[in-house]
Image: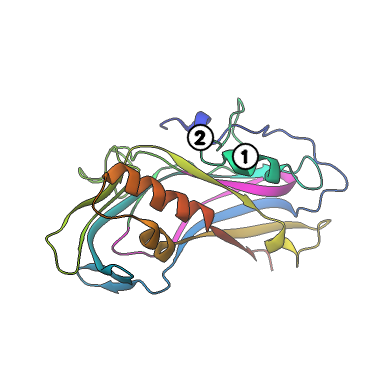
Amino acid sequence: MFGLLTLLACAPTAAVVAEDAAGPTLVGVTWALDWRLGAVQVHEGGLTLTRDDGVLSVSEGSLGDVGLSLIPCETSDSGLARLNPIRAAYAGHGATLDSSTWSEGLVEQLTTPETRVLGAAAFEPTRYCGAHYAVAPAGAGWEGASEEATGKTFRLVGGLDGAAHTPLAETSYAHGALIDLLPAAEGLHPGQAHDLRITVTRDLEAALQAMPLGGDPHDAAWLALGQMMDTVSVSLTPTDE
C-alpha cells in the first residue's frame, strides 16, 4: 500500500496503556466513513452549493482514502494536543501498524457522497485515546478507482454560475487528521471492553466553501483538504450490545 508505513505509523503503536488514561478499552472495531453535507445539494449530475461568490456546481470529484487506525493511550491526554499542529504531515511514523488498522484503499466519488462501511478488526483489549485518518494518491487497484482518479488524492471538476466545467482542485499530496476519541467516548465505561463501530464524518460543505476558485488547482485542493481535516468528527457506536 502506497506510503502506508509513512502515513499511518508516526506515533508509537505499541504504547503501554497508562492506568489513568480515560480512553475506552476496545477489543474490536468496524470502520465507517460518512459525510456531513450541510447546504450541499446532491443532484443526478453532481453537486451544487451556494457560496458568497455564486453557485458552485461540481460534476466530477474523487477522494483517495488510504487508512484508518486507532492510537493507544500513553498518558491521560494521549499527547494529541501536542501533535495537532503537525497533523498534516503526521499520520504515523512507527515501524509497525496498530492491529486496528484498515488499509485497503478506497476511492470515494464526491458527487455521490454516501456512508461507506469498511473493514472490521479484532484485537487484544487495548485502551485507545485517538485515531488517525489518512488520504493519499489513489492506486489503480483501489476499490472505486478510475483513470481520472488514479494518482490523485483529491480532485474536483466544476464551475461557478453556469460557467464551463474545468478542473477546480487537484492534488497528489497526502493529508491526514488526528482525532481525539475522548469526547465521543464519554458514555463508555473505560474499564469495560467494547467492540465499536467508529464512524469518521467529513464536512463536504466546509471543504467546498474553503476552496478558492480561479487559481492554482493544487492550492485549492490543499485548502479544501485542510478545512475538511480540521472539521472531521467521530461517533462511537457499540456493536456488542
What span is colored magenta in the figure?
A: 110-134
Q: Which mark is residue 62?
A: none
Q: Which mark is residue 7?
A: 2
Tag nearer the camera, 1 or 2: 2
Outermost residue, left side: 164
- Identified at 30% across, 52% down, the residue is 62
Q: Is residue 95 left or right of residue 136?
A: right
Who comes first in sequence, dot 1 or dot 2? 2
The amino acid type found where label 1 is placed reads Ser
Whether residue 165 appears in magenta in the rendering, the answer is no
Q: Position of residue 235 (x, y in %)?
A: 60, 63
- Identified at 75% across, 64% down, the residue is 186
Characterize the magenta stretch by its predominant secondary structure. Answer: strand
Q: Quadrant of the C terminus?
A: bottom right
Decide: is 132 above or below 47.
above
Residue identified by numbered label 1: 99
Q: Is residue 42 left or right of residue 131?
A: left
Whether residue 121 appears in magenta in the rendering, the answer is yes
Q: Position of residue 108 (x, y in %)?
A: 35, 54
Decide: is 61 above or below 161.
above
Q: Is residue 39 left or right of residue 21?
A: left
Asked which quadrant contains residue 35, the reply is bottom left
